[in-house]
Amino acid sequence: MSIERSLVLVKPDGFRRGLSGEVLRRIESKGYLLVDLAVLTPTREQLAAHYVEHQGKSFYEGLVEFMCSGRVTAAVIEGQDCIAGFRSLAGATDPTKAAPGTIRGDLGRDWGGEVQQNVVHGSDSPKSAAREIAIWFPHL
Ligand code: UDP
Ligand code: MG
């Protein structure tokens, strides 16, 4: 266990639906610290770096299209084991399967598109978190 930082994005579907505050409320209620916040429209370059592990996959192009379709709220959060902790708060990738009580389970659903619009992104490992924080918050 160690004090970690994680990169969270309220994706364009969540931002459009006015859910940034609700996501941040859940993060703060859990006890994690908000280190930095930004509202921005991602560039394709940022998304190519952010989703490098998914390049070449069937959903990649649609994912980048979706993620640059509007503004996102980006956050760096901090706390003991917050990388796994936020993944728990977020729930399963597929919002239909995500458990009630989780962000994706409570706030997400299948809207019929080819890409899962699942409200939030959260880093999946310390290595990913460091890489992703450098993309979205280069000054940190
Ligand atoms: N995604 C999708 N279809 C898939 C897998 C992923 O549309 O079969 C999208 C979904 O929005 C997901 C993102 O691509 O959040 C990144 O996928 P990853 O497997 O990293 O899921 P996550 O870490 O976000 O749970
Ligand atoms: Mg992922």
Image: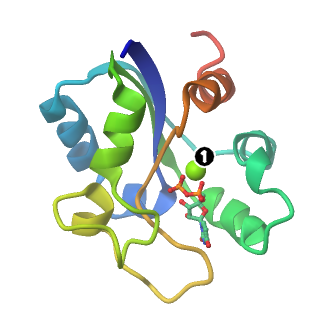
Relative to 77, does residue 65 appear above or below in the rendering? below
Toward which corner of the image does residue 126 lie, by quadrant? top right
Q: Residues within 10 Å of mark 1 (few under 14, many from 20)?
A: some
Location of residue 96 in the rendering, given as x and y in whole percent from the top left corner? 35, 79
Relative to 112, does residue 20 appear above or below in the rendering? above
Q: Which residue carries the number 1 mark?
A: 41
Q: Secondary structure at mark 1?
A: loop
Residue in front for this viewpoint, 64 or 91? 91
Residue in front for this viewpoint, 133 or 73? 133
* Furthest residue toward right: 56
Residue 110 makes an appearance in the image = yes
Picture colour scheme? rainbow
Location of residue 140 in the rendering, given as x and y in whole percent from the top left corner? 57, 10
Q: Residue at x 19, y 41 (%)?
A: 26
Relative to 120, does residue 31 appear above or below in the rendering? above
Residue 18 makes an appearance in the image = no
* Furthest residue toward left: 29
Of the 4 image quadrants, the one containing the N terminus is: top left
* Furthest residue toward bottom: 112
Left or right: where does residue 18 sit relative to residue 71? Answer: left
What number of labels is visible?
Answer: 1
Location of residue 43 in the rendering, given as x and y in whole percent from the top left corner? 73, 45
Toward which corner of the image does residue 30 lie, by quadrant? top left
Question: In the image, what residue type sits under mark 1?
Answer: Thr
Q: Residue at x 25, y 67 (%)?
A: 99
Q: Residue at x 21, y 48 (%)?
A: 22
Q: Residue at x 62, y 10 (%)?
A: 139
Does the beta carbon of the residue at mark 1 sit less than 8 Å from ligand 1? no
